[in-house]
Amino acid sequence: MVYSASNPAPQYPGQYGAAPGTPGYTPRASVTLDARQNPRAVHSFVAGLIAVFFNVLLVPSILAIVLGAQALTRSNQLRAAGQEDKTRGLAVAGFAMGVVGGVWGLIQGLIFVIGFLPVFFFDVS
C-alpha cells in the first residue's frame, strides 16, 4: 500500500504515551518482554518435524531439544513478567518431537550396527 497526502498512513493516538515529567506519565518496568519475542519455539517445532521424518546423524533432534529448552526458558521468563506466551505449546511439541526423533534415530542406528555384526565377526561364506 502506498501512502500519500490523499491516502495518509493510519495514526494511533497515545501510542507512545506521555513524555517523562508530564502529567499522566507512568514509568515502565526496566525490562519488558514481549510474547512475540520467542521465535525459538517455532524453530524448535520445525526442527522437531524434521527430526521425526529425516533425522540425519541426530542433528535435527539435538537442535529441536536445545531450541525447545531455550524456548521453554523464555516462556517461563514471559510468564514471570506477567505476559502471556502463545508459543509455549510449539516449544513443548518441538522438544517432544526432538526426543522421539532422537530415540527413533538411535534405535535405527542400533539395528543398522547389529545387522552388520555377522559380516565382521562370523564367516558367512
Image (cartoon, grey):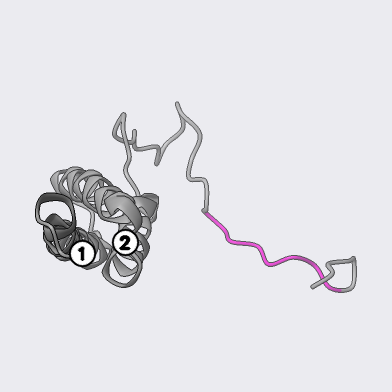
Q: Residue furthest right?
A: 5
Callout 2: few (<14), some (14-19), or many (20+) C-alpha neighbours within 10 Å? many
Inspect the image, locate mark 2, and give the three-letter code of the amino acid beneath it: Asn
The magenta-colored residue range is: 7-14
State the mark number for residue 55.
Answer: 2
Image-based side of 70 in relation to 47, left or right? left
Tell me where residue 110 sits by quadrant.
Answer: bottom left
Q: At which x and y percent is residue 94?
A: 24, 62
Q: Nearer the viewer, residue 62 or 81?
A: 62
- In the rendered image, residue 121 lying in the magenta stretch gets the answer no
Q: Position of residue 99 (x, y in %)?
A: 15, 59
Contact? badges 1 and 2 (CB < 8 Å): yes
Q: How crowded is mark 1: few (under 14 residues within 10 Å), some or many (20 or more)?
A: many
- Looking at numbered disc 1 in the image, what kind of residue is underneath it? Gly
Measured in 3D between alpha carbons, the distance from the residue under mark 1 to the one under mark 2, in whole angstroms, is 7 Å
Q: Residue at x 52, y 53 (%)?
A: 15
Would you name the residue on which mark 1 appears?
A: 101
Residue placed most toward the observer, 104 or 33:
104
